[in-house]
């Protein structure tokens, strides 16, 4: 996916773009020209130094143009089918990856039986590890309720999963931490932008308000489904990535 050019720059296969804003003196991160392949969401954490040394040669190309270049170069991957999986989880088994990664890092996962409860705290079923669930999940809960239920929250300390109706998943605001401002300094007052809460999320209009140097509140104009702690919120002004951070 990446190769070093000399000792100065790094070129990667991410679909994104960069440019130097001569008026502000800052490097900017932009969405790819091919909106369907844009990967700028994943790059919000890059620093000015890193952006200044990064090249994204695919950012100005569509996927079909990239395939044409590969065909002309007789590369065997020219007709490779699209993959929606993470490149470092080629099997698509995310639970197995989390287990292996946690073991490698010395992180203890509670694999013992835990409770699945409703919003009132009533136990309606049991599970064998909270890492098997994600907020917003409907399928694979391990029990039949006679009506659609979704994962509303996960409490690893109590080894508990809370489920309920889909409309409970919709919220208008969240706090984010570890904020990195890319194309501008931290704004002194609330800023209007479009924000994404996951890679495939349609950017939604929101107000971004810096609470301190590392914490920001994002308030959406309309409720968004499954705002999930641990995922990133990335804010945009058109094609320009303003910054991002981790949902608390």
Image: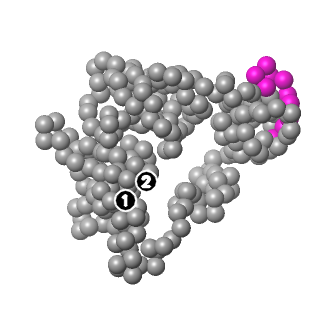
Above or below, 172 against 61 in this view is: above
- Left or right relative to 188: residue 129: right
Judge whether residue 122 is colored magenta: yes
Distance from disc 2 to disc 1, alpha carbons, whole Å, reads 8 Å
Which span is picked out in magenta? Answer: 118-127
- Seen from the viewer's position, the closer of residues 43 and 196 is 196
Q: Are marks 2 and 1 in contact (CB under 8 Å)?
A: yes
Q: Residue at coordinates 49% horizontally, 44% vertically from top-left?
A: 199
| Disc 2: which residue | 37
Crowding at label 2, few (<14), some or many (≥20) Cα neighbours within 10 Å? some
Q: Is residue 49 shown in magenta?
A: no
Residue occupying image coordinates x 46% and y 21%:
221
Q: Nearer the viewer, mark 2 or mark 1?
A: 1
The residue identified by callout 1 is 62
Query: Left of 242 or right of it: where is 174?
Result: right
**Residue 179 screen position, x and y as percent:** 39, 33
Q: Please provide percent x and percent y for residue 242.
A: 32, 35
Q: Quadrant of residue 69?
A: bottom left
- Tell me which residue sits at (35%, 65%) in the image: 65
**Residue 166, horizontal then vertical, whole percent:** 69, 29
Name the mark on residue 191. Answer: none
Q: How many labels were placed on the picture?
A: 2
Q: Secondary structure at mark 1?
A: loop
């Amino acid at each position: 996916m990446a190769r070093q050019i000399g000792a100065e720059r790094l070129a990667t296969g991410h679909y994104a773009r960069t440019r130097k804003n001569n008026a502000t003196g800052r490097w900017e991160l932009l969405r790819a020209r091919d909106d369907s392949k844009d990967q700028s969401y994943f790059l919000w954490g890059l620093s000015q130094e890193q952006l200044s040394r990064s090249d994204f040669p695919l950012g100005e190309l569509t996927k079909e143009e990239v395939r044409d270049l590969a065909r002309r170069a007789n590369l065997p991957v020219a007709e490779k089918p699209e993959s929606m999986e993470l490149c470092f989880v080629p099997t698509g088994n995310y639970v197995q990856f989390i287990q292996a990664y946690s073991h490698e890092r010395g992180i203890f996962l509670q694999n013992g039986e835990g409770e699945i409860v409703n919003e009132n705290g009533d136990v309606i079923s049991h599970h064998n590890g909270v890492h098997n669930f994600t907020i917003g999940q409907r399928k694979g809960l391990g029990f039949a309720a006679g009506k659609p239920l979704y994962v509303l929250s996960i409490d690893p300390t109590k080894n508990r999963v809370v489920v309920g109706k889909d409309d409970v998943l919709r919220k208008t605001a969240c706090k984010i931490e570890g904020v990195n401002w890319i194309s501008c300094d931290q704004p002194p007052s609330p800023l209007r932008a479009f924000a994404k809460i996951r890679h495939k999320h349609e950017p939604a209009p929101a107000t971004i308000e810096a609470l301190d140097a590392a914490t920001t509140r994002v308030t959406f104009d309309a409720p968004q489904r499954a705002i999930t702690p641990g995922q990133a919120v990335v804010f945009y002004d058109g094609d320009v990535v303003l910054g991002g951070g981790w949902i608390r």
